[in-house]
Image: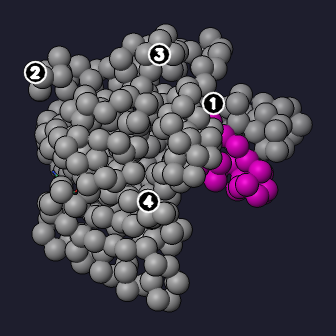
C-alpha cells in the first residue's frame, strides 16, 4: 500500500518542524509548498538527510507548484504573514485572507479529498475562510488551536502539581486569542477535577487563576521571549497529533476549531470546541453543557471571532 501523502502549505518555522516530525514519526511522504523559492526545497533536503541517522524512509519534496500536492491525504496550512509593527489587525486579516484564497483554490484543485488543518492566524476566521474558498466539506476542514492551548494548560498544571503531564487532562474552548476559555471544571489530574484539588489543598484558587491567565497569554509569552517570530515546536506537535488521529483513525477526543452548525447554539461558524477526530475527519462535536460563568466567557469569545469573520466578509465580497 502506498504511504500516505502529507502536504504542508507554508514551509516557515512551523512548516519545517511539521515536516521533520512527520518524517520522524513515519506518518507518510511529505511535500513542502511555499512561495519563497528555495525555502521548501532546502528544508526538504535537510530533513531527508537526517533520514539515515534516524532510520526513516519517508520521501520529502519542496515545491512552488500546487500540482505536487496532488492526491494529498492531509494538508496542514501555515502559509501567511505574521503581524509586523505598524500593521493593524485588519491589515493582517486582508493579507492572510488573500493567502487563504490562493491556498483554498490550490487544495480544491489538487487535493479535494484531504483532511485540512489550518494554523494560520487569526485562526478561527482564517479556517472559516479557507473552508469557503476550498469548498471542501466542513467536517474535513478544521483549525489547530485547542490542542496547543490545552497542552500549555497541562504543562503549567503538571509543574504546579509536580505530577506527570500524562496524568493531566485539560480542556480549552472558544476562539484562539485573549478570550479563550480554559475550562477548570473539565480539567483533571488523573480524573480528579481541578476544583476538588483546590479543596484538597493541593493548590490555591489564586494559583489556579494565575495558571489560567498564563495559558491565555501562552502565545504572547513565547513571542516576548523569542522577540522575532512566534512559537513553532508545540504548535507543530499539536497539528501532528491531529493529523495522526485522522490517518490512523484513532477517534481522539481533541479540542479544535470545528465548523458548528447548531452545536453550542452557533450557526455557520468555526470556534474551538471538543471534537472526535478519526478517518471521517471531524466525526463528532462533543456538545457539552456549559455553566453560567463558562457560557458568558464562551459568548464573549464567540463575539470576538464573529467580529473577525464580519471583517473578512467586508474585505472579500465573495464571502458575504
Ligand atoms: P513563518 O515562519 O513566517 O512561515 C510562514 C510561511 O508562509 C513563510 O515561509 C512564507 O513564505 C509562507 N507564505 C506566505 N504566503 C504564502 C502563500 N501565498 N502560499 C504559500 N506560502 C506562503 O510563520 P510560522 O510558521 O511561525 O507561523 C505560521 C502561521 O501560524 C502564522 O500565521 C502564525 O501566526 C500562526 N500560528 C498559529 C498558532 C495557533 O495556535 C493557531 C500558533 C503559532 C503560530
The residue that mark 1 highlights is 183
Which range of residues does the magenta coloring cover? 151-172
Which quarter of the figure has residue 96? top left
Between the residue at mark 4 and the residue at mark 3, the CA separation in whole angstroms equals 39 Å
Q: Using a 10 Å C-alpha cutoff, classify the residue at mark 4 as few (fewer than 14 neighbours), some (14 to 19) or many (20 or more).
A: some
Marks 3 & 1, CB-CB < 8 Å contact:
no
Residue 118 appears in the picture as rendered: yes
Split into 4 quadrants, where in the image is the C terminus? top left
The secondary element bearing badge 3 is classed as helix
- Name the spot of residue 233 as percent of width and height, x first: 46, 62
Horizontal arrangement in the rendering, residue 69 relative to residue 294 (left or right): left
Instruction: Residue at the far right: name it.
Output: 200
Residue 227 appears in the picture as rendered: no
Q: Main secondary structure of the magenta part?
A: helix
- Name the spot of residue 134 as percent of width and height, x first: 24, 35
The residue that mark 4 highlights is 4
Q: Using a 10 Å C-alpha cutoff, classify the residue at mark 3 as few (fewer than 14 neighbours), some (14 to 19) or many (20 or more).
A: some
Magenta stretch holds residue 19? no
Q: Using a 10 Å C-alpha cutoff, classify the residue at mark 2 as few (fewer than 14 neighbours), some (14 to 19) or many (20 or more).
A: few
Earlier residue among tags 4 and 2: 4
Earlier residue among tags 2 and 1: 1
Between the residue at mark 1 and the residue at mark 4, the CA separation in whole angstroms equals 35 Å
The residue that mark 3 highlights is 299
Which of pointers 4 and 3 indicates the residue nearer the eye? 4
Amino acid at each position: 500500500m502506498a504511504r500516505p501523502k502529507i502536504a504542508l502549505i507554508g514551509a516557515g518555522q512551523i512548516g519545517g518542524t511539521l515536516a521533520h516530525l512527520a518524517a520522524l514519526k513515519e506518518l507518510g511522504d511529505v511535500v513542502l509548498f511555499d512561495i519563497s523559492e528555495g525555502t521548501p526545497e532546502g528544508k526538504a533536503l535537510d530533513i531527508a538527510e537526517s533520514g539515515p541517522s534516524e532510520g526513516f524512509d519517508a520521501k520529502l519534496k519542496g515545491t512552488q507548484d500546487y500540482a505536487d500536492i496532488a492526491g494529498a491525504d492531509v494538508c496542514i496550512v501555515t502559509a501567511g504573514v505574521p503581524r509586523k509593527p505598524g500593521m493593524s489587525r485588519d491589515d493582517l486579516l486582508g493579507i492572510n485572507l488573500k493567502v487563504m484564497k490562493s491556498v483554498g483554490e490550490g487544495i480544491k484543485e489538487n487535493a479535494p479529498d484531504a483532511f485540512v488543518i489550518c494554523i494560520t492566524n487569526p485562526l478561527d476566521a482564517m479556517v472559516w475562510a479557507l473552508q469557503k474558498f476550498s469548498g471542501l466539506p466542513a467536517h474535513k476542514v478544521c483549525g489547530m488551536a485547542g490542542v496547543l492551548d490545552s497542552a500549555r494548560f497541562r504543562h503549567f498544571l503538571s509543574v504546579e502539581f509536580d505530577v506527570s503531564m500524562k496524568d493531566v487532562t485539560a480542556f480549552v474552548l472558544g476562539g484562539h486569542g485573549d478570550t479563550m476559555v480554559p475550562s477548570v471544571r473539565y480539567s483533571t489530574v488523573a480524573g480528579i477535577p481541578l476544583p476538588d484539588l483546590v479543596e484538597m489543598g493541593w493548590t490555591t484558587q489564586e494559583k489556579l487563576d494565575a495558571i489560567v491567565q498564563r495559558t491565555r497569554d501562552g502565545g504572547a509569552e513565547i513571542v516576548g521571549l523569542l522577540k522575532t517570530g512566534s512559537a513553532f515546536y508545540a504548535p507543530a506537535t499539536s497539528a501532528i497529533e491531529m493529523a495522526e488521529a485522522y490517518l490512523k483513525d484513532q477517534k481522539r477526543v481533541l479540542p479544535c476549531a470545528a465548523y458548528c452548525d447548531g452545536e453550542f447554539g452557533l450557526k455557520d461558524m468555526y470556534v474551538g470546541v471538543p471534537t472526535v477526530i478519526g478517518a471521517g475527519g471531524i466525526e463528532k462535536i462533543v456538545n457539552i453543557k456549559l455553566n453560567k460563568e463558562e457560557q458568558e466567557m464562551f459568548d464573549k469569545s464567540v463575539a470576538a471571532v464573529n467580529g473577525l469573520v464580519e471583517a473578512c466578509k467586508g474585505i472579500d465580497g465573495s464571502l458575504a
